[in-house]
Image: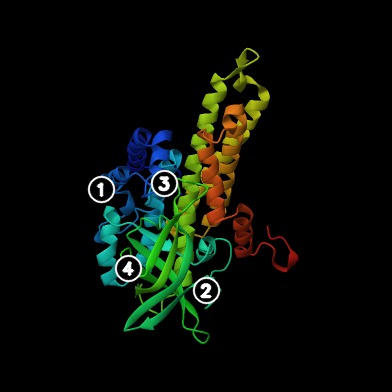
Amino acid sequence: MDARLTAEQEEVRRTLREVLVKRCGPDDLRAAARSPEGHDRALWETLSRQLGLPGLALPERYGGIGCSVTELALACEESGRALAPTPLFATAALAAPLILALGGEAQRAALLPRLASGELTAALAVPGAGLATALALVGDNRGDWAGDGRAGGVQARRADGGWRLYGQAAQVLDGHSAGLLVVAAHTGGFARSRTLLFLVRAEAAGMVRARQTALDATRPQARIELRDVRAELLGDEGADVPAALAATGDAAAAVLAVEAVGAADRALERTVEHVRSREQFGRAIGSFQAVKHRLADVYVGVRAARSAAYYAAWATGAGAERVGGLALAQALEALRTAASEGIQLHGGIGFTWEHDAHLSFKRAAGDELLFGPVHRLRAHAADAARLFDAGEVRV
């Protein structure tokens, strides 16, 4: 693995940072989060149509750029630095890879070019609050998380030569504004119980979408209710959906880890700027040894998390071992620490709910609620590596 960025990757980073610095100030973020879409539509047009971010990791034959997960992660690091509320992660890291992996050729040809151009946005909807379980980040995803015929899940049945969906999904990232939903549903009854993925258009009759109040307003979520909704099966009934979800989950975790590193890095920069300018006892508080030590620990944590996150992104593209969940745990912990120290070291002003430091703190807490928590991510990684088999620690 060559840890150096190529000239093209550096150009992606520079260009994207210039755009986001101009368009994602604190007031811009709050205004976008309060909008009906939950994001700045004009900014999304720029990121998708002009810069081509949604198609970075999609093949050229489907309108993408043909890059790897690393380039998508690089773009998300910059959006993470700005805490930009966009449907990039939900569309490019969750929905599009599933359509590419499981969809038939007609489905790919019809949907992926529109996703790559940003004309269409998409979201992954799983029953209840089981996104981390469905993506196999905190445990095996071959259980009954899709409903198993019980209330609170999503069930699919055949009707009139097609499929109908019933049930609800909570915590659907950007689900209230997405033009396409990829819905995980249970079907087959007791004898042939299995989970399949279905495509549901935004205008489908019988579907009710409601935006939820989320801790992190820059990561909008929705509750989806499906009441006898006509749906299209993604791929065929013989597809190994749990395996596809696990592979997508590992890549998405790597992308999310890099994004969290970007947010942590910016939180650290903001804190360093503050301690250099704030004076106490006639000198900048950043000159005090205790403050230096605390920020040095944050710096080491962020740098280590960046190394782990980029290795995970590279490993996804290189077909190496799956370490996305472990990298995500380290990145979320680094972000939580950077945000918490930032609030502490900003003093009294840092504790006001309106301060910018809380945007980073809410992102850290919100991502743990969605994809973690950190201790479960690490526990699953340890189980997958069989570190504690037969009560012995493997070294």
Q: What residue type is labelled 3?
A: Cys
**Which secondary structure, mark 2?**
loop
Residue 348 in picture, x, y percent from top left: 61, 27
| Residue closer to the observer: 57 or 278 | 278
Left or right, 292 with reference to 325:
right
Q: Which amino acid does label 2 sit on?
A: Gly
Residue 49 in picture, x, y percent from top left: 25, 48
C-alpha span from label 2 to label 1? 38 Å
**Which secondary structure, mark 3?**
helix
State whether residue 14 is above or below residue 73: above
Q: Do the residues labelled 2 and 4 touch (CB within 8 Å)?
A: no
Which residue is drawn at the image coordinates 69% and 60% (left, top)? 394
State which mark lies toward you, 3 or 1.
1
Q: Do the residues labelled 2 and 3 touch (CB within 8 Å)?
A: no
Which residue is drawn at the image coordinates 32% and 84% (left, top)? 160
Q: Which of marks 2 and 1 is nearer the N terminus?
A: 1
State which mark lies toward you, 2 or 4.
4
Residue 204 — which label? 4
Crowding around mark 2 (Cα neighbors within 10 Å: few <14, some 14 to 19, many 20+) is: many
Question: Which residue matches tag 1?
Answer: 49
Residue 164 in picture, x, y percent from top left: 38, 77
Q: Earlier in the sequence, mark 2 or mark 4?
A: 2
| Residue closer to the observer: 316 or 216 | 216
Crowding around mark 1 (Cα neighbors within 10 Å: few <14, some 14 to 19, many 20+) is: some
Crowding around mark 4 (Cα neighbors within 10 Å: few <14, some 14 to 19, many 20+) is: some
Residue 314 in picture, x, y percent from top left: 45, 52
Q: Earlier in the sequence, mark 2 or mark 3?
A: 3
Q: Are marks 4 and 1 in contact (CB under 8 Å)?
A: no
C-alpha span from label 3 to label 1? 16 Å
Which residue is drawn at the image coordinates 55% and 36% (left, top)? 353
**Which secondary structure, mark 1?**
helix
Q: Earlier in the sequence, mark 4 or mark 3?
A: 3
